Amino acid sequence: MVQPADWDARVLRWQARHGRQGLPWQGTQDPYRVWLSEIMLQQTQVVTVRDYYTRFLGRFPDVRSLAAASLDDVLALWSGLGYYSRARNLHGCAAQVMQVHGGEFPRTAELLQTLPGIGPSTAAAIASICFGQRVAILDGNVKRVLTRALGFDADLAKGANERALWGHATELLPQRDLVRAMPRYTQGVMDLGATVCLARKPLCEVCPVMDICVARREGRPESYPVKTRKLKRSAQSLWLLWAQTRDGAVWLRQRPTPGVWAGLYCMELFESYDALRAAVPAVYQDRLQELSAFTHVLTHKDLHLHPVYVQLPARTRLSQEGGWQPVDAWPSLGLPAPVRKLLQG
């Protein structure tokens, strides 16, 4: 496959003039901040991440403070951002950086990948932006940019083809002045995918590589990238027991790991209304109030949630693992987004 000779120069010039400049995690080579932003941005839109990133830094300004925090505190601050395994890995990674690396992030992509939750693309982003290492990222946006520009039509559902694309991505990297070029180049290819080379209706007329883009020449940019294997979605119905005392305490139980909402505090969950009803002492079962059901969408699954409300005396116990959380305590816990919305509503 022919590689455009001036590809990196085009990307560098475009990023300097037209790339995103105002995001809170830009303009820094602090590996803690770059790492935090990269983890938060996985499968999450920039507009959502902005506020979480700012709040997170306010509470945990460096890797030392994050490692010293409890997992419950981390999950509480992450609550609503989704994909909670990221938060658990974030906490574990901070601890490992402190314990194994003396509080300093490794300076190479190879070593960064040994840390919890850091894959090849995230490692490359940190190593290239913070340390100027000549390594290529390959997140969803970059895959789209490269497959279109190069006309790479191999099926990325196959690992060998994705590795081949990674090879092409590496060949396109800057060759000189890497400490200055690599951070801007890495940000540039991400910016191109996020703002110009869009999944639908790409803005080809303002793209810095439009004249050498194979997909544009073919007139079918939306045909790239090619990936035949699709995620299989499933659905599950769950009944949530919203038990509350007269003074506002809520019964919550920390979810087991692994499983849905692992590590978060949640209402008791049941597979059926009958199972929920059986968990409530018989004398209070006539107090149960079925509320409107709603659907919560996860990456691979739709959760059809059926909340059932009941007011109970504080002496009541619904399980060995759960407990009553006072009204001034439960808001600061790590709660699944739909549970938090129910309680706050």
Image (tube, rainbow, N blue to C red):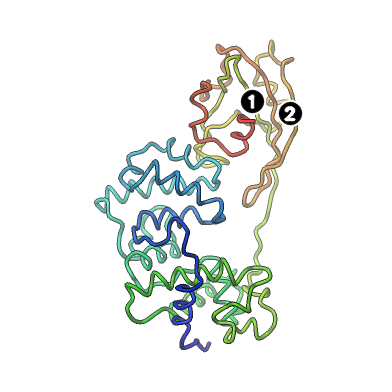
Where's residue 2, x and y in %? 52, 89
As helix, strand or loop, the secondary structure at mark 1 comes to strand
Q: Residues within 10 Å of mark 1 (few under 14, many from 20)?
A: many
Q: Residue furthest left?
A: 102
Question: Residue at 33% across / 70% down in the picture?
Answer: 132
Quadrant (top left/top right/bottom left/bottom right) for the C terminus: top right
- Image mark for residue 291: 2
* Spatial separation of the CA atoms under disc 2 and disc 1: 10 Å
Looking at the rendered structure, which numbered label has been put on residue 242?
1
Is residue 121 left or right of 144 when viewed as pictured? left
- Badge 2: residue crowd in 10 Å (few <14, some 14–19, many ≥20): few
Name the kind of residue labelled 2 in the image.
Leu
Question: Is 89 in front, or is 60?
Answer: 60
* 188 vs 98: above or below: below
Q: Is residue 118 left or right of residue 159?
A: left
At numbered mark 2, what does the secondary structure look like: helix, strand or loop? Answer: loop
Residue found at x 68% / y 85%: 218
- Going from the N terminus, do you reach mark 2 or mark 1 first? 1
Do the numbered discs 2 and 1 sit on residues whose CB atoms are within 8 Å?
Answer: yes
